[in-house]
Image (spheres, rainbow, N blue to C red):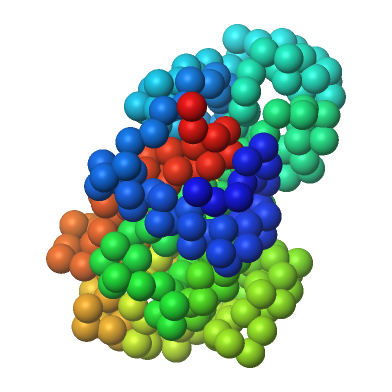
Amino acid sequence: MAELFGRDLLSLADLNPTELQELLQLATQLKSQKLQLRCNKVLGLLFSKASTRTRVSFTVAMYQLGGQVIDLNPNVTQVSRGEPVQDTARVLDRYLDILAIRTFAQQELETFAQYAKIPVINALTDLEHPCQILADLLTVQEYFGTLAGLTLTYVGDGNNVANSLLLGCALAGMNVRIATPRGYEPDPTIVEKTRAIAGDKTEVLITHDPELATKGASALYTDVWASMGQEAEADDRFPIFQPYQISEQLLSLAAPDAIVLHCLPAHRGEEITEEVIEGLHSRVWDQAENRLHAQKALLVSILGAD
Ligand code: CP
Ligand code: NVA
């Protein structure tokens, strides 16, 4: 089992390449049911943004491990009435075994982790979405049988998903290309970290040219053009992002056996066409299912099996 016992996962950069590989291996074993583990612990979900997949997959993962989940919707806790993060963190620490947080600022997540001694998992911030990328890499590995040496191209907004994909692909020994409009590039600190992980072993390309980025890629990935919290910008963004839509035409430039990924929820006709998301290359439903297996592996690695 990966050496993650008692640790936080605030960024994908908290993992090294071996830990990532071991997590994916454990997820594969759990998915195949060749391995069944128990972990009778209590997970808290403190989500300040909407969620379908992350909320439900964490909950089901914990139930299948024999554990319990408490949904700490900020509206029904004192969080929405302004109780300081430092106080909430120290109190939840006394009740729970592990806490998954979905919020806006990465700094808030880091403050939680600083004040709570229990492990804290990033269930999405404006900066990163590491749990999503564990499932994405599992999906690519299942399809191609390997990750090292493959090329993943992300086309769209340089958002939380793009940032974590950069780190995840570099850790997995994959080439990673990100194509965004000017002004919407991924976080520069994350790009720098990615280049440090990749060294001269794999490619890290940040470009404004979606066609260049897509040529020969094995996995073509996109996400919404306006993330949660950016809804007011959506109308202004659409014309800027139009050339970054994943369409049949863009997909035709990828490798013939390329797979198409989307973290969901998707906006058909915006970042991806109906034909592509429903087409033969799409693996988005396997990808969504893999949230469950990847997070089960993560939970049991951090908490330890009974
Ligand atoms: N992909 C993802 O995180 O989905 P939810 O927002 O539904 O959790
Ligand atoms: N980038 C999106 C991902 C949703 C799962 C958002 O943050 O809203």
Quarter of the rendering containing residue 102? top right
Q: Nearer the viewer, residue 285 or 8?
A: 8
In the image, taking residue 214 as reference, residue 18 lies left or right, namely: right
Furthest toward the front, the residue is: 306
In the image, taking residue 75 as reference, residue 64 lies left or right, namely: left
In the image, taking residue 128 as reference, residue 299 lies left or right, namely: left
Image coordinates of residue 145 in percent, x first then y, are 29, 70
Image coordinates of residue 261 in percent, x first then y, are 34, 61
Quarter of the rendering containing residue 199? bottom right
Residue 262 position (above or below residue 148): above
Name the residue rendered at 43%, 56% in the picture: 24
Image coordinates of residue 14 in percent, x first then y, are 67, 55
Image coordinates of residue 196 in percent, x first then y, are 71, 77
Q: Nearer the viewer, residue 12 or 18?
A: 18
In the image, taking residue 189 as reference, residue 11 lies left or right, namely: left
Residue 268 position (above or below residue 250): above
Name the residue rendered at 15%, 65% in the picture: 280
Q: Nearer the viewer, residue 30 or 115?
A: 30
- Can residue 232 be seen here? The reply is no
- Can residue 296 be seen here? The reply is yes
Name the residue rendered at 55%, 85% in the picture: 202
